[in-house]
């Protein structure tokens, strides 16, 4: 059985592009460029809570980094460095090799150096901390929303939740391909995040369910929100063969989307539409921010009626 | 049952002294001072591997941060910020409160801001990523050792391993107080690490067993080492009532020490002795670096004979 040290060395030591001293010492050394702030985020994936213990290791490796990249995208920061704490029930070398391949595929795609690792024996879990740079003062937080700002969502929220429901046989999709890809290989919206510097007033990544995360943005901005259900991007969800109620439920409260929700002033609409074309990424205007309200988020239905959403979001403790 | 969000907010939101934007957004924002490199390290503690599942949560909180602080001390870096990924089998609020108390006690003592957190349901585990500042070029790595350098060790390696053996009833200590304190509340040697800038050629923190970690320093410096067994600091180990063989075994290969091992040129001996007095911390000269050798580390016994050590160190996979 190879030792912990051999294992780390063999699979997690790769060339580092912008690191002064990489894995192998007590700590790594990196240099943050002058005038830059450092953005830092951490997210763990735990077997049985965030993924099935028999999930494909290559997908897991990708996703463990991608969910953290999504957080940096939501700050409009450029990712640079990551650490990985990997807990494994034993040394299954082919598993580790596939996990590392997926992890480094995602890292290379997004120009991230791995600067620290820790591998231990225990129940399967992955904790990643990711660091990025952003010009001082240019970050887009959750707190900058203004009354009257449009609310936009990227890509196709709800698709990953449909994929999960399909895997769990809670429903049966005619075509699960895109839904499963969204679940296993989320695409962090880094280009979009960077392009929204100076455009969006507030932003966050939708990982706990769209309505719940709109609530988080409202809470930090001290505002309310009106969500127009006729504007929701349901087309791709319908194409999976899901029924209308399931599609809507997954879109509003599904979780695991890793899409960007942002608030921007109405005069930016043309620029945002142009951005959607340039990035070949749907950007959908789904509502707007209002004065502070109770409940914070309201849905406007097709008949013009207003009502409170059923679910306030996804909670790994409540749902676990 | 409080939600994940409530739990994080209630116990892990504390005032941050040197952070631009702390916990609560998609990422935290911090500023690294001009001319400084960033030192980054990560270490996870997993129930059943690193600690007993019924370990006191206050001690665990302290130790989870302290073992990471020890890594920064070994680079001669000043700690600044940390992230915490906490996996819990359920929400036991008194456990979380005690854990947070221990964690923040250690953070406050060492001037560390907590800038990111993630709490999930799963088998008990704690992953911390810690980052600190160091003037560019001033880090003390493992690679700078020179032939003829003295090898020094801080404090009392072996004490924590005796404490663990006592807890596991593999031996019986007459007085286990200090040994258990060393095991549960390791003191990261940050003042020592900073004071050794410009003095030590190479340094690491001893966490995998003294002999194994000397091997790591030798490997990175491309040298051998001669360890003088008559110079080993055994006094405090004897005071616990441990027999000589157990004391020596724990000192040489025990693990969990979190002491600093450093290589410094002989002319620095007086300065190092003065430093030991100023910090009220024993610093013991236990051998020296040699030309490259095979085996890399040799022990010189009281009768002048040389022999290879029995164990090459501690491995959480081999030992798990």
Image (cartoon, coloured by chain):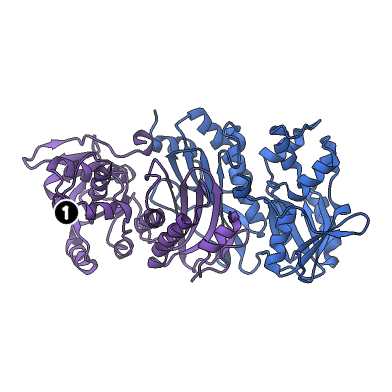
Chain colours: A purple, B blue
- Image point (35%, 58%), residue name: A73
Does the image show residue B5?
A: yes
Determine the secondary structure under disc 1: helix
Please tell me whether residue B96 is drawn above or below residue A159 in the rendered image: above
Q: Position of residue B188 (x, y in %)?
A: 68, 48
Assign the N terminus of chain A to one quadrant of the image. Answer: bottom right
Residue A39 appears in the figure: no
Q: Nearer the viewer, residue B59 or A45?
A: A45
Q: Quadrant of residue A107?
A: bottom left
Residue found at x 24% / y 52%: A179
Instruction: Specify whether A180 is left or right of A241.
Output: right
**A127 or A12: nearer the viewer:** A12
Chain letter for the residue marked with disc 1 in the picture: A
Rendered image quadrant of residue B265: bottom right
In the visual, does B142 lie left or right of A264? Answer: right
Does residue B20 appear left or right of residue B159 in this picture?
A: left
Measured as percent of width and height from the top left, residue A14 is found at 50, 67
Q: Determine which quarter of the picture holds residue B243.
A: top right
Q: Name the residue carrying label 1.
A: A236
Q: Quadrant of the C terminus of chain A?
A: top left
Residue sitting at the far left? A303
| In the image, residue B219 above or below residue A205 | below
User: Which one is in front, A80 or A219?
Assistant: A80
Q: In the figure, A256 relative to A316: above or below?
A: below
How would you rate the neighbour count of disc 1 (Cα within 10 Å): few for under 14, some for 14-19, many for 20 or more? some
Residue ranking furthest to the right:
B303
Q: How many marks?
A: 1
Which of the pair B14/B12 is nearer the observer?
Answer: B12
x, y (%) of residue B83? 50, 49
> Residue at 81% across / 30% down in the picture?
B174
Residue A111 percent location from the top left of the image: 42, 67
């Amino acid at each position: 059985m190879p030792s912990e040290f051999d294992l780390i060395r063999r699979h997690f030591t790769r060339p580092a592009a912008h690191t002064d001293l990489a894995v192998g010492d007590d700590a790594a050394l990196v240099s943050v460029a002058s005038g830059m702030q450092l953005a830092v985020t951490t997210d763990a994936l735990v077997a049985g809570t965030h993924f099935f213990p028999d999930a494909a290791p290559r997908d897991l490796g990708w996703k463990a980094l991608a969910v953290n990249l999504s957080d940096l995208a939501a700050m409009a920061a450029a990712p640079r460095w990551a650490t990985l704490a990997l807990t494994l029930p034993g040394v299954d070398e082919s598993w580790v090799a596939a996990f590392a391949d997926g992890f480094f595929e995602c890292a290379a795609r997004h120009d991230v150096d791995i600067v620290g690792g820790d591998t231990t024996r225990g129940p399967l879990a992955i904790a990643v901390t990711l660091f990025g740079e952003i010009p001082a003062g240019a970050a887009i937080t959750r707190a900058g929303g203004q009354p009257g700002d449009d609310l936009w969502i990227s890509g196709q929220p709800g698709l990953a939740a449909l994929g999960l429901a399909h895997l769990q046989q809670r429903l049966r999709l005619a075509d699960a391909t895109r839904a499963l890809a969204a679940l296993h290989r989320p695409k962090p919206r880094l280009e979009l995040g960077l392009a929204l510097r100076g455009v969006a007033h507030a932003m966050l990544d939708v990982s706990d369910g769209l309505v719940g995360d709109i609530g988080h943005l409202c809470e930090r901005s001290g505002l309310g929100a009106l969500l127009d259900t006729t504007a929701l991007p349901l087309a791709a969800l319908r194409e999976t063969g899901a029924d209308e109620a399931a599609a809507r439920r997954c879109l509003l409260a599904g979780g695991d989307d890793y899409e960007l929700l942002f608030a921007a002033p109405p005069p930016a609409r043309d620029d945002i539409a142009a951005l959607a074309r340039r990035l070949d990424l749907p950007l959908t205007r789904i509502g707007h921010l209002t004065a502070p309200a109770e409940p914070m988020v309201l849905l406007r239905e097709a008949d013009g009626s207003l009502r409170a959403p059923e679910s306030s979001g996804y909670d790994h403790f409540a749902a676990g």
